[in-house]
Image: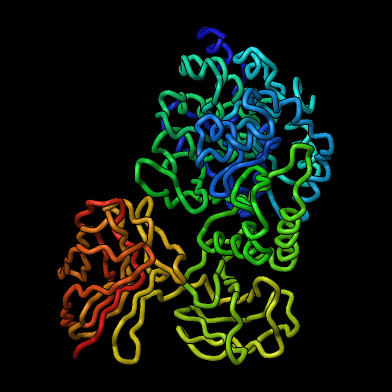
Amino acid sequence: MSAPLLTLALLALPTVQGPQYEASWESLDEHETPQWFRDAKFGVFIHWGVYSVPAYCDTSTYSEWYQAWVDWNSHDGLERKFHEENYGADFEYREFAPMFRAELWDPAEWAKIFRRAGARYIVITSKHHDGYCLWPSEEASAARGYAWHSEAVGPKRDLLGELFEACRGEGIRPGIYYSFLEWHNPLYDEDKPRYVEEVMVPQIQDLITRYKPDVFWPDGEWDHPDTLWRSQEVLAWIYNNAPNSAELAVNDRWGKGLRGQVGDYSTTEYGDLGNSSGEGMREQRPFEECRGIGHSFAFNRNEGYDIYQSRTESVRELIDLVSKGGSLLLDVGPTADGRIPLIMVDRLFAIGRWLETNGEAIYGTTKGPFESLDFGRATTKGETLYLHLYDWPAGDALTIPGLVTPIRSARVLGGRSGALKVTGAKREWTIHLDGEHPKEHATVLRLDLVGEPEVDTSVRPDGGGSYVLKPSQAKLTGGGIRLEERGGGENIGYWLDAQDHAAWELKLAPGRYAVDVLYAIAAGSEGSVISVSWGEQRLAASLSQATGSWDSYQRLPLGFLRVEEEGAGDLMLECLEQPGLAVMNCRELRLIRLD
């Protein structure tokens, strides 16, 4: 397709009624995130394609990258050796396409599984990095000179069309994943701007107009800026021409360094924003975490049972993300013949059974008001606070730390007792759970309040007036820094950028405090200079010695703070210099009262 024809194609469709968007990020940012997406909270990701035939890779990575792992002789040659032993050294990846037959596939069965799981939307790989399309795309085959879409080779079916029809019949919103980059596409390799013009743009237009997806999920953007992908132009066309523009949710993967900065919502992958610009996520937009039930997104026959999430882990993953203001896009990797592995179905059904009783504490909620809870997580909906109990309280009595808003009533969702007894006062409310018992995966306690929940999140001292500041109590700011669990406990990790920082909200009484940090640093990353500040006072120290590994912790004295008058504020932990890969892993910060 020539440039003039492309221009005609961009103008051929009548624009929809509603706001018109210009090809600039400022204008595109005016597109509202659809309310349905903010409320949905749970979707199913589907990675399915030619790579589902070999379905094999190292368990540390993703099998949909099989073609690249073989080409690059990755993971000490694991995938290439497997390929040569089972298919032959001369067997080309394209020869897997006729073997991707989907002969046992029933899209109606898939849709019923997703409905029973409680999923509100799905996103399927219309085209992954190998370029094979799950819909009849003339551009896919023309660019390569051989059949490379599902209606021409393999299943001989329009897989997208059939699945979209089935999902909509079950009340599930369907969405499309689309990879910008392509391996083994000569046009992509030789002339990327021409590839964008002749393949990428027409394919995206075709997907949007033919299938009217509720989610558009681009990927494979990370190596090149948005100007190469013509992202602003393409997204403006989508918003202006999609028949369901106001209902269409588009992610943030539109060019190198843009994740978290553009689109209707931000995306993390196994907790990582993956943003090479180092900037964090916009707070005014929701975020969506994608991950597999196993580790790989596409089916990996090399994964053993222990790699898969348990039922409880699957349910709690959803709870945890929603409590933080996010949503979960949980992936399944079907087999080449069209079946979803039963262990994946089992995990989806576990989530669905839990949601049948507790869905009101997930769908349509907002993030919890607490920085951390020892017993579980929290979500909110107006004047209702939902407490998700992972651990049952001793003596059947739950004390809610920091809640200021009075409680009108309390009950357990799906519980036995109806209204529960509430005693105490603000910051010390206690719910008496006599007659109730723990539910599978998580017990949800519904509290109806006299107003929207207000919480005093400041860290309080122990009986001796000292403070032990935990990672889960910190407010973390930056593109990489985050809370992680490793080495038997929680720590502040992935501190890869000196601009990232942590803060604890405190109320400090007058006195003198000795300050120290419990930290870990692997060899090669020592030498960072950190600081702790309270008001105008700042303590700085060099982490000059490696501790042995990222899981070997040592305590380092930082100095003394003098507080003259009682006050509230943020205690800041920052990095002043960072010569190595990361600043440190931080497990604890202490302020020990001396007088």
Residue at 26%, 66% (x, y): give it. 572
Q: Quadrant of residue 567?
A: bottom left
When the figure is inspected, residue 272 is found, relative to residue 16, above or below; the finding is below
Judged left or right of residue 583, residue 539 is: left
442 and 57: which is toward the camera: 57
Image location (x, y in percent) of residue 322:
56, 60
Residue at 30%, 91% (x, y): give it. 464
When the figure is inspected, residue 462 is found, relative to residue 346, above or below; the finding is below
Tell me the quadrant of the picture where the C terminus can be found. bottom left
Tell me the quadrant of the picture where the N terminus can be found. top right
| Residue 167 visible in the picture | yes
Image location (x, y in percent) of residue 458:
36, 76
When the figure is inspected, residue 475 is found, relative to residue 456, above or below; the finding is above
429 and 544: which is toward the camera: 544
Q: Quadrant of residue 122?
A: top right
Image location (x, y in percent) of residue 25:
41, 33
